[in-house]
Amino acid sequence: SAVISQKPSRDICQRGTSLTIQCQVDSQVTMMFWYRQQPGQSLTLIATANQGSEATYESGFVIDKFPISRPNLTFSTLTVSNMSPEDSSIYLCSVVPPGLYTGELFFGEGSRLTVL
Amino acid sequence: AQSVTQLDSQVPVFEEAPVELRCNYSSSVSVYLFWYVQYPNQGLQLLLKYLSGSTLVKGINGFEAEFNKSQTSFHLRKPSVHISDTAEYFCAVSDPRGSYIPTFGRGTSLIVHP
């Protein structure tokens, strides 16, 4: 299994500012994803973080709003830019466990963001 | 495209009672199915998964789920719940012939009362 650490675990931010969330994995992983979990909603995939190249964004998410970096196989960051109260959510980093890929994911503990 | 419906947003139950959390999926192809649990202030943790074979799948913490292809369901059950089972439960589906990236349901909040 992989141990995933996310920072910060929670934060309260002002409208118009930006926040960068870090995701550190204790082993090299090929596939990393960023999800958003809004209150009472399903998990929504924001993007796939690709090592050494631009992230692949899902419909409704754009690089200007959610820039992602992945400099190596154990680390990624997600920035939430120009925040508004609608960005208040839990942001989750997830990785694919080693072996045959079935869709199973390991998750970090999440970063709980409140925008005032 | 696949979708997942969790029919109950909240399920209250008394301790030691049985519980069933319902999950239906929509897909035109064979799928892999998962149940995850999210305890308060934590990330998601895999409870169990169905890939192939026996339709009754056993997971951690005494939970089990049954895959029913004709009803496109994957309901989660536990014969006797504990206070510590209070958590959010998510059903997810992935397409083994597609990208494998899972689609999640909206979650069911299980609330166990003493």
Image (tube, coloured by chain):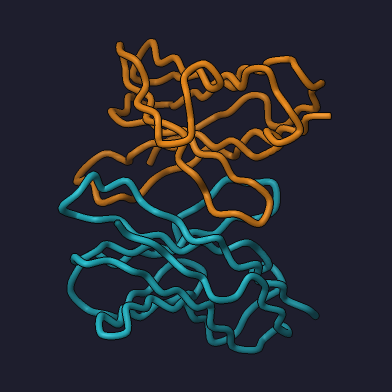
Chain colours: A orange, B cyan
Task: Locate residue B95, reporting x and y percent.
Answer: 24, 56
- A4 versus B43 height, above or below: above
Residue at image position (34%, 15%) is A54
Residue at image position (73%, 85%) is B14
Q: Is residue B64 left or right of residue A9?
A: left
- Locate the N terminus of chain B by quadrant: bottom left
Residue at image position (79%, 22%) is A15
Front residue of this view, candidates A58 and B80 = A58
Residue extending farthest to the front is A60
Residue at image position (41%, 69%) is B59
- B83 versus A27 height, above or below: below
Q: Is residue B6 left or right of residue B33?
A: right
Q: How many marks?
A: 0
Task: Locate residue A2, reporting x and y percent.
Answer: 41, 36
Front residue of this view, candidates B49 and B11 = B11
- Locate the C terminus of chain B by quadrant: bottom right
Residue A21 figure quarter: top right
Task: Locate residue A88, reporting x and y percent.
Answer: 71, 36
Task: Locate residue B80, reporting x and y percent.
Answer: 59, 85
Residue B37 figure quarter: bottom right
